[in-house]
Image (cartoon, rainbow, N blue to C red):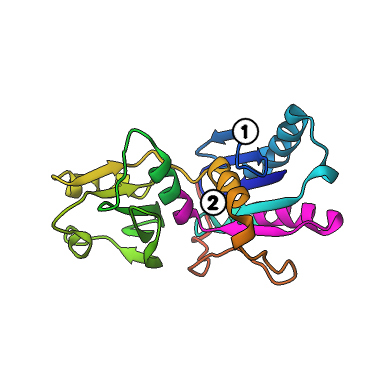
C-alpha cells in the first residue's frame, strides 16, 4: 500500500494505491483559499479509513515535490516525512509538472500519440510560469524551468507533425495567444495524488527513494514576500 500526497497547487489531494497501481481510495478538493493546512490530514485519515488500512500497513509514501505553492509544498512534505520517520517508510517523489504530463498521457479523450508533445505549465505569478517538456511517451525533452511567456514563446516547441498539448493552470493566462491549429489547451488539469500514487506504485522497483534527512520541496525560485499592508491606513 502506498499513500500519496499532492499539495503543489490550489488542489489538495490524497490517494491510496496497491502495488499494481490501482487506486483504492482518494480525496481531493480545489479552493482559491489554499485549504491544505485544514484538509490534508483529514483527507489522509479519510482515505485510510475508507480502505480499511492502518498506517502501519503502508509500505511507502509519495509526495509531489513541486514546483508550485511554497506553503502547500511545505505542508505536503512535512506531512509525508511525519509519516515516514516513525513508521520507517521510504519516501518517493515526482515533480508537479511530470504529474501533469502523466495525467495528459492517461487521459483517454486526448489520445496522446508518440508524435505529440506535452507542455505542462503552472502559474508562477505575473507573466511567468513553471514549465517542462515531454514527448508523447512521457520522456522529458526539456527540464523544469521558470519562463516568462510571450506571444512567440511556443515557437521552439512546434514541430511539423504531432500536436502541442498545453496542460495546467498556467495555460489560462496566455490562452488568447495560443488558440491555433495543432495547439491543444487544457487549463483545468491539476497535479493529482492519484496520478502520483499509481505511477510510483507501478514503478517503485525502478525508482530510488528520497533521503529523508535531506529531502526538501523543489521550490525552483526563492520565496519573495509581498509588501505588507498598512493595517492602520483606512
Please say whether residue 6 is visible from this viewpoint. no
Q: Please state the total of marks drawn on the protein image.
A: 2
Q: Residue at horizontal 78%, vertical 56%?
A: 89
Q: Residue at horizontal 50%, vertical 66%?
A: 224
Is label 1 or label 2 in front? 1
Residue labelled with disc 1: 27
Give percent across and percent down for residue 170. 36, 50
Please say whether residue 225 is visible from this viewpoint. yes
Q: Is disc 2 surrounded by few (<14), some (14 to 19) or many (20+) residues within 10 Å?
A: many
Give percent across and percent down for residue 86. 86, 56
Vertical arrangement, residue 117 with respect to residue 187, above or below: below
Which region shows up in magenta?
Answer: 75-99
Residue labelled with disc 2: 8
Residue 83 covered by magenta stretch: yes
* Foreground residue among 50 and 11: 50
* Left or right: 45 in relation to 98: right
* Foreground residue among 222 and 25: 25
Asked whether the residues under the numbered discs 1 and 2 touch, taking CB atoms below 8 Å apart as contact, a structural biologist would say: no
Mark 2 element type: loop
Amino acid at each position: 500500500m502506498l499513500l500519496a500526497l499532492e499539495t503543489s497547487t490550489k488542489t489538495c489531494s490524497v490517494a491510496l494505491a496497491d502495488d499494481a497501481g490501482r487506486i483504492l481510495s482518494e480525496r481531493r478538493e480545489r479552493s482559491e483559499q489554499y485549504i491544505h493546512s485544514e484538509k490534508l490530514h483529514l483527507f489522509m485519515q479519510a482515505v485510510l479509513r475508507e480502505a480499511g488500512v492502518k498506517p502501519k500497513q503502508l509500505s511507502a509514501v509519495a509526495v509531489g515535490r513541486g514546483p508550485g505553492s511554497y506553503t502547500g509544498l511545505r505542508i505536503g512534505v512535512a506531512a509525508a516525512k511525519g509519516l515516514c520517520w516513525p513508521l520507517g517508510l521510504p519516501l518517493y517523489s515526482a515533480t508537479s509538472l511530470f504529474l501533469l504530463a502523466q495525467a495528459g498521457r492517461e487521459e483517454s479523450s486526448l489520445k496522446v500519440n508518440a508524435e505529440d508533445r506535452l507542455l505542462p505549465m503552472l502559474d508562477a505569478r505575473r507573466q511567468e510560469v513553471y514549465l517542462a517538456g515531454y514527448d508523447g511517451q512521457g520522456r522529458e525533452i526539456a527540464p523544469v524551468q521558470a519562463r516568462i511567456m510571450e506571444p512567440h514563446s511556443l515557437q521552439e516547441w512546434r514541430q511539423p507533425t504531432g500536436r502541442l498539448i498545453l496542460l495546467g493552470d498556467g495555460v489560462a493566462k496566455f490562452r488568447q495567444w495560443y488558440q491555433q491549429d495543432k495547439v491543444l489547451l487544457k487549463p483545468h488539469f491539476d497535479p493529482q495524488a492519484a496520478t502520483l500514487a499509481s505511477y510510483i506504485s507501478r514503478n517503485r522497483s525502478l525508482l530510488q527513494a528520497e533521503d529523508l534527512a535531506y529531502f526538501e520541496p523543489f521550490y525552483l525560485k526563492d520565496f519573495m514576500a509581498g509588501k505588507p499592508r498598512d493595517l492602520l491606513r483606512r
